[in-house]
Image (tube, rainbow, N blue to C red):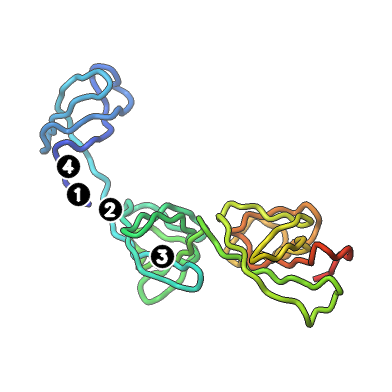
Amino acid sequence: MTNEIETGERVAVACPSCSPEEGTVHEVLRPGGQATVRCSECGHVHKTRIEREREVRLEVIVSQDGDSRRESVETPADQTVSTGDEFVLETEEAIHLVRVTSVELEGEKRVESAPAEEVRAVWTRAVDNVSVNVTVHPNDGRRDKSRSVTSHVPGDHEFTVGEVEEAEDEEFRIVGIHLRDDVSGYHHTKLDHEGDTVPAKDVKRLYGEDVSSSAWSAW
């Protein structure tokens, strides 16, 4: 994105005719130091100075299903970037919702947060669609026969301890949920009380038992 205002661009500025205190959408008719704009609300044409926020380009590393790729995004220079933040990243291939897992400064120093202009790279993982590993215990209780499957679900899909789910043609009742290291707001990293609910994007691993088993397995 260029930092210069262009003809036809839409900007939010105050209108002296219908909205002198708050900004409304205007179309830029002629850019410049004193740009000529037209209010989309009342049609009033007037001149105004348009201030553009200084932006910087951030390098964004996106992790998804074990693979990673480098993208970039423009953001206001003074905006704070913090671990746990989520934002929409638009690329040529797709649009992803990503969560910040690490903020890197010059010298490969990792911090919890920093102004965008100080950030060298932002490490993220895609959370719009996620793959969750599941350990399924057999119905005879033998742990040496446990098997692993993968559940592919939207990031906001909720897993609840005690409820039945299906993955790779396996039906299982959730008996435990192990949370990811990059989430906060939970009292424990492992949840095993019936009714405990977590969105898939926060889950590191699920533990389940065959629905044919009547026993409640410890994990």
Asked whether the beta carbons under mark 1 and mark 3 sit within 8 Å of each other, the answer is no
Q: Secondary structure at mark 1?
A: loop
Viewer-proximal residue, 147 or 44?
Answer: 147
Q: Residues within 10 Å of mark 4 (few under 14, many from 20)?
A: some
Other-residue count near label 1 (Cα within 10 Å), few / some / many at <14 / 14–19 / ≥20: few
Query: Sequence-wise, which precedes: disc 2 or disc 3?
Result: 2
| Residue 70 horizontal side relative to residue 16, left or right | right
Disc 4 designates what residue? 5
Q: Which mark is residue 3?
A: 1
Give the percent coordinates (x, y) of residue 47: 14, 27
Q: State which tag comes first along the sequence, 1 or 2.
A: 1
Q: Which mark is residue 213?
A: none
- Dot placed on the residue nearer the N-terminal end, 1 or 3: 1
Which residue was labeled with disc 3? 122
Query: Type of residue at label 4?
Result: Ile
Eyeballing the image, is 165 above or below 64?
Answer: above
In the rendered image, the residue lying farthest to the front is 169
Discs 4/2, front: 4
Alpha carbon distance from label 3 to label 4: 28 Å
The number of discs equals 4
**Residue type at the position of mark 3:** Val
Relative horizontal placement of residue 121, taking residue 132 as reference (left or right): left
Q: Amino acid at mark 1?
A: Asn
User: Between 88 and 32, which is closer to the camera in this rendering?
Assistant: 88
Residue 175, relative to residue 9: is it above or below? below
Q: Residues within 10 Å of mark 3 (few under 14, many from 20)?
A: many
Measured in 3D between alpha carbons, the distance from the residue under mark 1 to the one under mark 3, in whole angstroms, is: 22 Å
Q: Say which residue label 2 marks.
A: 55
The residue under the point 48% across, 54% down is 86
Q: Quadrant of residue 52?
A: top left
